[in-house]
Image (cartoon, rainbow, N blue to C red):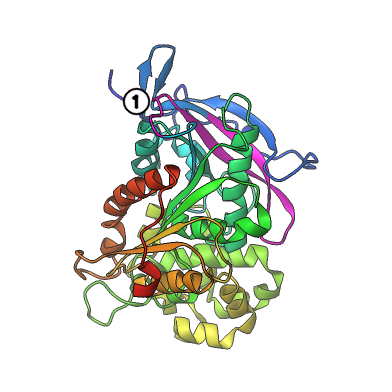
Amino acid sequence: MAPSATWSGNAPAAPGAPDSTASFYSPPVPLPGGRPGDVIRSAPMALALALPQGAGQIPGTATKVMYRSTDANGRPNAVTGTFIKSSQAWHGPGPRPVVAVAVGTQGQGDQCAPSKLLGQLIHYNFPLDLMAEYEVLSIYPLLARGMSVVVTDYAGLGTPAMHDYVNRLAEAHAVLDSIRAAQRLAHSEVTPATPTIVFGYSQGGGAAAAAAESQADYAPELPIRGTYSGAPPADLIATMFTAPAVVAGPFRNQRPGGVGVGLVGYYINGVYADYPDTRAEIDRFLTPQGQQMRREVARTCVPEDVMRTFYRSISDYLVGGQSAAELLARNPHFRKRTEEQRIGSLRPMAPVLVASGSNDDVIPAGQVRQLARDWCAKGAQVEYRSTRWIPDVLPSLAIGHLLPFLPVTAEALAWIDDRLANRPIASGSCTSL
């Protein structure tokens, strides 16, 4: 039987698609008492991409879950996600591990939540609302190796609140609490002693990195053996406001505009929601067109976000046509909140693999390398790898960002095998940075 996929439009949802009533994603008011990681509710779900196997299915049995976490301002919140118990045997040392997958950019609309997309695979509503769950390319190889997986939706993605895109604390908490939720979920077979890995690329690489360095303060009890952080946006000034995907053009013709312009809209929406002290500045520096852009992208998945803003300069949305650099210089509260998102100030407890593409046009390699240097200076166990074979072609179209995804994922799979076997990480990486 061929794998099934759900095409989500205005027709009734197919069996196994996410709950069309959306009631699962509405947190109880008030939130029940408890600890971060406590399961608020759970429900079985069918994976869109699956094959039958006896009484179960390949690659595993999936459960969507809502759990307690902590938002960017230290307040309790509810986050949703997915736990998948692998149907394959684990042949590695010790008990079956669990991998917390932090996903790359999905979007800001609730329809983009991974726990919904894993039940659909492809989502589409006319005319531009389109998304495919590309993270099956990282999740399914882990399941095929016999590892169970927990995938957070992040705060506000699926649930009613605004998804605060690339917020360091919110994402770290959501990832770490997803591991706690997997431990407390009935029949997961994940215990407080289960070997654990954190795994992510792009936005997910930043979330994984933030989780790695936040563990000591927020979740020191978790048995994390290692973290893979691919292409992490560790310095948002270098990514959101100076990356080629935002400020350069694809044809080297001095006309800015790339795939990253709409992502700045996601980021501004999150800052506006989380930090009231920035709202007056944001309202001043955005033109009416800029305000319209940020309202529109808040309802989109990333393909529509790109289609709405591609080949537009970020200056088109800013009062006086100012540049991104001028925006930061003239708005101290906004700049301060952006600087607070910098990853690298804390020491990860477990080994970390940091990877980047040398010609990444969305998340520049220089700030990824700097993250590795920062952690090395704090005495962390860091291995840094750079993908150098990808040429600098059509910068700002994300070619340099997307092409390394699969090769570095394959390298990361081998790296986490070593961590689960308690082998030492390669020596000399810190001295060569």
| Relative side of 170 to 367, left or right | right
Q: Residue 298, percent across and down?
A: 53, 57
Q: Compared to 55, does 216 lie above or below?
A: below
Give the residue at x 55% y 61%.
348
Q: Amino acid at mark 1?
A: Ser
**Mark 1 falls on what kind of element?**
loop
Majority secondary structure of the magenta segment? Answer: strand
Can residue 153 be seen from the camera position used here?
yes
On screen, residue 89 above or below 223? above
In this orientation, which residue lies closer to the viewer: 124 or 201? 201
> Percent x, y for residue 89?
40, 25
| 91 in magenta | yes
Q: Which quadrant of the rendered structure holds the N terminus?
A: top left
Name the residue nearer the viewer: 108 or 52.
52
Q: Which residue is mark 1?
A: 4
Give coordinates of residue 236: x percent, y percent.
Answer: 49, 72
| Number of other residues with Cα within 10 Å of mark 1, as a class: few under 14, some 14 to 19, many 20 or more | some
Q: Is residue 236 above or below residue 58?
A: below
Is residue 67 in the magenta section? yes
Magenta region, residue range = 63-92
Who is closer to the viewer here, 368 or 319? Answer: 368
The residue lying at 29 percent from left, 79 percent from top is 255
Residue 406 placed where, x, y %?
28, 50
